[in-house]
Amino acid sequence: MNKFFSVFLLLCALAGGAAAQDRGLIMAVQKDLGPEVVIGKQWAVFIAIDRYKEWAPLSNPVRDAMEIRDILGENYFIDEVRELYDDDATAENIRRLFFDLRSNVGDNDSVFVFYAGHGHTDEVTNSGSWIPMDGSRNEMAQANWLPNIQIRNMLTALPAKHVFLVADACFSGDILDTTRGASPVIDSEYHRRAYSRVSRQVMTSGASETVPDTSEFALRLKSSLRRADTAYVDPEYLFMNVREVKTTRPLLGTIRGSEHQDGGSFIFFRKDTQSAAIVQTPGGQTPAPLPTPEEAMPAYPTQSAGEKPGFAYDAFWSVGLNAGTAFTTPAGTAGITATVPFIIGNSFFDFGFEAGFVDRSSDSDAYNSYYPYVHYNFFVPVDNDVIVPYIGAGAGYMMASYEYPYDTEKKNYAAFDAVAGVKLLGFIDVGYSLRASSNGVGSRVAVGVFYGF
C-alpha cells in the first residue's frame, strides 16, 4: 500500500510540473492576446531522409531536422515530438504517422511538420511528390511515392486548429497557394486575430525546381528560429528571413483546398515570452541577423575539424580498379572494388573481387585464383578529401587452381584480412592487406584509381 501511495504521489508531482509549465505559457500568452485565446498542445513532426533504397543519397536532411528539433525544444514550447528518419521513413510509416496524428491531435492544437529529402515532379501531370526511403526510381510505376495531393489531404484532415508545413525538397512548390495579401502590421491584435482563426500554411525551399543538397534554406531557417527575439514567431517572420536565399526561390502560402481562414496563422511561442518584446513594425517584422560563419558551416559531432559536411558519404561512394603485388599466397594481381559508406561514424565498406593468373609454361606449372571479399573500414580525414588514411578488417573466399607437371590441385578456403591505406585526392587509393588462411599467411600492396559518385 505504501509503495502504491508513493508511486501515486510521484505521478501527481510530474503531472503538476507539466501543468505548471502549461499554465505559464497560457498566462503569458493570454496577458498579451486576451483571456479568450485557447492554447492547445504544440506538436512538432520531423520526416527526413539521407539514405534511400534506390535514389542517390543526401548529406544533410536528417542533420537539419534534428537541429531544428533541438532548437525548438530549447527555445519554444513544444509538447509532443514525432520523428521518422532514414530507414523508418517509408511510405507506409509516413502514412501511419499522419493517421496516428489524426487520432491524437486536439481541435485547439498546433502541428508543425518539417520534411527534408528527395522530391520529384511528374512531367505528365506536372505534380510533385515526396520520395520516401523506399520510393521507387521508376517514374512510370512511382511505387511508394507520396503525391502532393495526398500530402495536402493528410494535412487538411488533421483536426488541429493550426498546421504549418515546411518542405525542404525538390519540386515542392505545387503543394501550396501563394496568393497572399500585403504583409500585415505585426502587433498583439494581429497575433490575437491570427491565432483565433484556422490556419493551414506551407513554406517550401523552392518552387518547382531542383533544390541543392546543402540547403541554404535550412541554414537560414535554423538561424531565424534560434536568434528570434520576439515573443511570437510565425511563418511571415520566418519567410522574411529565408526568402533572401540565393540558390532557390522559397515560397510561402496556404495549403490548396484546405479550410484555411484568411488572416489565420500558426505561431511558435518562445519560452522566454515574458521578457521578449513583441515587434510592432508596419508591414512586417524585423528580420533576424544573418547566420554567423560558425552557424553557416557547423561541424559534425563525429567528424574532425577539417571535415566538410557530408564528407563521409560524398567521398566514399566509389568504384574502381586496382593493381598490386601479392606475396606468399596467390591473392591476385588485379581487381575491382566498390566502396559504400556506413551510417556509424566515419566508416565504410569495401566490396571487391581480385583475380590472379601465373603461367610458367617453361617450368610446367601455373595457377589462377579468384577472391571475392568485403572489408569494414574506419577513416580519419586529415585534409578534407585530399588525404584520408583508413584501417579496417574483412574476410573473403579464395578459389584457386594449381597446375604442376604431373598433377592439378584445386583449393577453396576462407581468408581473413587486416587492411590499411590512404585515399588521395578523392580518386587514388594506396592500400596494404595482410591475409591469413589455412593455406598460409600473405600480404598485398595495391594502387587503385577510383570514380566517386
Image: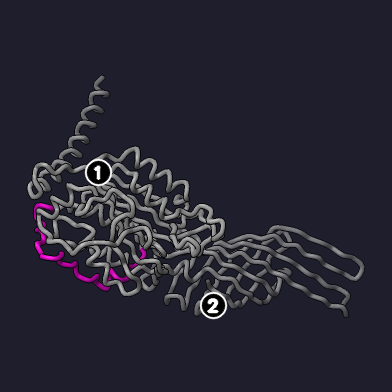
Q: Main secondary structure of the magenta part?
A: loop
Report the residue at 27% width, 23% height from top.
4
Residue 402 lies left or right of residue 39; in this view the side is right
Q: In the figure, residue 79 lies in which quadrant? A: top left
Does the magenta portion include 287?
yes
First in sequence: mark 1 vs mark 2: 1
Q: In the figure, residue 104 lies in which quadrant? A: top left
Q: Residue 291, labelled with which disc?
A: none
Residue 349 lies left or right of residue 344; in this view the side is right
The colour scheme applied to this rendered structure is one colour
Part of the protein shown in magenta: 273-300
Does the magenta portion include 306?
no
Crowdedness near tag 1: few (<14), some (14–19) or many (≥20) residues, C-alpha within 10 Å: some
Disc 2 designates what residue?
Answer: 427
413 vs 283, nearest the viewer: 283
Please determine whether, in this image, residue 253 is positioned above or below residue 39. Answer: below
Q: Are marks 1 and 2 in contact (CB under 8 Å)?
A: no
